[in-house]
Image (cartoon, rainbow, N blue to C red):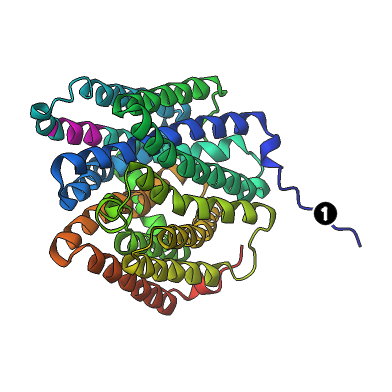
């Protein structure tokens, strides 16, 4: 009997996919640097944890508002054109944030808060179009469905790697070279990403069975998601886990007031979950999960909730780093399983619309979770709000395990 050996580098052997990864690396680094600098800048000006939650809300509202239409656009317009148009808009936003740092006099600082929120609002709308386009463009560069899991693993590992380097790099540049240098780095990386995506060959859209109105097309995508228990339960699980269990928005408060560290420490804290996730995803690239994928996903989301509880009560910087890294490792497994099953269970000509629904559940849950964390911290206190969120995550896992029998039995 002969067996076919597993090639962990199969997707990387495709030149167009390598360009895709390079472009995504650059704009992910840019977004991570921007996120850590904006959050630190806003907290330095306001000294109010609720203002950190408002950053997430300013990004989530436009992203959710355009999400369904963005999915329709991704299924009816060149996905490469969408990506390059969005990157152009994000470049303008980065340049605008850089412009606002030209005058940092004390009397001008409070006048910058509203413009910063406005720029984040615009970038949130742009990113609402980016998610479905990126999600549906990647498989067009792969062609062979048997390589999807491998491509997703490399894509996720690279994204997490950028999430490790981005916050740390942003914190270090801010600490040693100043805020203007940080935003300039953000702009240069965004420009590089735009250039790389322009080099990728255009790919024809998948054939659409019949021309539909926008409304009917959107209804079809929503109906598909809500009629598929596996996809619906997977993205719902992540939605509520991130909504209640995310403490990232409050990291500036932990860094400044509980763990007593500066912007360098904040960068490391923001990078820690991505370190754990990147290492776990890299491990999974060589050791993919097939059997018991659903049960393992449930276990990992529960582990994420426990980590949030432990982080909330920690007063030791190094223990907090370790716990955040472990939370990232659990999250990394969940991300790979969820992304793979959505790619496998979704028809090619519906991936933009399904991705848009997924983005409403998952992509914006980070920003809505940031707002929830800010409000909860204001009402309960920072530590109590994080512990409460972790406990709620465990409750969501228990409910999902009880109701979603197909997810429990899922194998990939």
Count of picture labels: 1
Query: Residue beneath label 1, please?
Result: 4
Q: Is residue 121 magenta?
A: yes
Q: Which residues are magenta?
A: 114-122
Q: Is residue 241 magenta?
A: no
Q: Is residue 339 left or right of residue 90?
A: right
Q: Is residue 199 left or right of residue 64?
A: right
Mark 1 neighbour class, 10 Å CA radius: few under 14, some 14 to 19, many 20 or more: few
Q: Where does the image place residue 25, in percent across and percent down from the top left?
A: 51, 34
Q: Is residue 235 left or right of residue 203?
A: left
Residue furthest out toward the right:
1
Q: Where does the image place residue 357, in percent across and percent down from the top left?
A: 36, 50
From this viewpoint, is residue 112 visible? yes
* Quadrant housing residue 292: bottom right
Magenta: main secondary structure equals: helix
Element marked by disc 1: loop
Residue sitting nearer the eye, 255 or 280: 255
């Amino acid at each position: 009997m002969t067996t076919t050996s597993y090639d962990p580098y199969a997707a990387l052997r495709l030149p167009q996919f390598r360009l895709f990864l390079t472009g995504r690396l650059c704009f992910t680094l840019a977004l991570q640097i921007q996120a850590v600098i904006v959050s630190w800048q806003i907290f330095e000006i306001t000294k109010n944890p609720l203002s950190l939650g408002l950053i997430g809300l300013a990004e989530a509202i436009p992203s959710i508002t355009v999400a369904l239409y963005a999915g329709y656009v991704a299924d009816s317009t060149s996905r490469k054109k969408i990506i390059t148009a969005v990157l152009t808009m994000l470049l303008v936003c980065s340049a605008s944030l850089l412009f606002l740092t030209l005058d940092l006099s004390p009397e001008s600082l409070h006048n910058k808060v509203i413009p910063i929120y406005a720029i984040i609002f615009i970038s949130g709308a742009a990113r609402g179009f980016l998610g479905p386009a990126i999600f549906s463009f990647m498989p067009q560069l792969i062609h062979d469905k048997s390589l999807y899991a491998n491509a997703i693993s490399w894509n996720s590992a690279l994204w997490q790697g950028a999430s490790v380097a981005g916050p740390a790099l942003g914190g270090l540049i801010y600490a040693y070279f100043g805020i203007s240098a940080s935003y300039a780095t953000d702009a240069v990386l965004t420009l590089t990403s735009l250039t790389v995506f322009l080099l990728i060959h255009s790919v024809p859209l998948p054939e659409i069975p019949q021309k539909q109105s926008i409304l009917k097309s959107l209804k079809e995508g929503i109906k598909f998601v809500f009629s598929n228990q596996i996809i619906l339960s997977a993205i719902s699980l992540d939605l509520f886990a991130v909504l209640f269990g995310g403490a990232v928005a409050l990291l500036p408060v932990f860094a400044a007031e509980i763990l007593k560290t500066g912007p360098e420490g904040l960068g490391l804290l923001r990078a820690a979950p991505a370190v754990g996730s990147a290492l776990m995803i890299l491990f999974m690239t060589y050791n993919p999960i097939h059997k018991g994928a659903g049960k393992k996903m449930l276990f990992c989301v529960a582990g994420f909730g426990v980590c949030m509880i432990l982080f909330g009560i920690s007063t030791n910087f190094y223990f907090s780093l370790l716990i955040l890294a472990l939370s990232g490792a659990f999250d990394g497994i969940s991300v790979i399983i969820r992304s793979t099953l959505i790619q496998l269970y979704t028809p090619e000509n519906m991936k933009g619309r399904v991705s848009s629904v997924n983005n409403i559940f998952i992509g914006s849950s980070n920003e809505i979770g940031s707002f929830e964390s800010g409000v909860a911290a204001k009402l309960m206190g920072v530590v109590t709000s994080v512990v409460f969120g972790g406990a709620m995550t465990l409750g969501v896992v228990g409910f999902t395990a009880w109701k979603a029998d197909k997810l429990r039995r899922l194998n990939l």
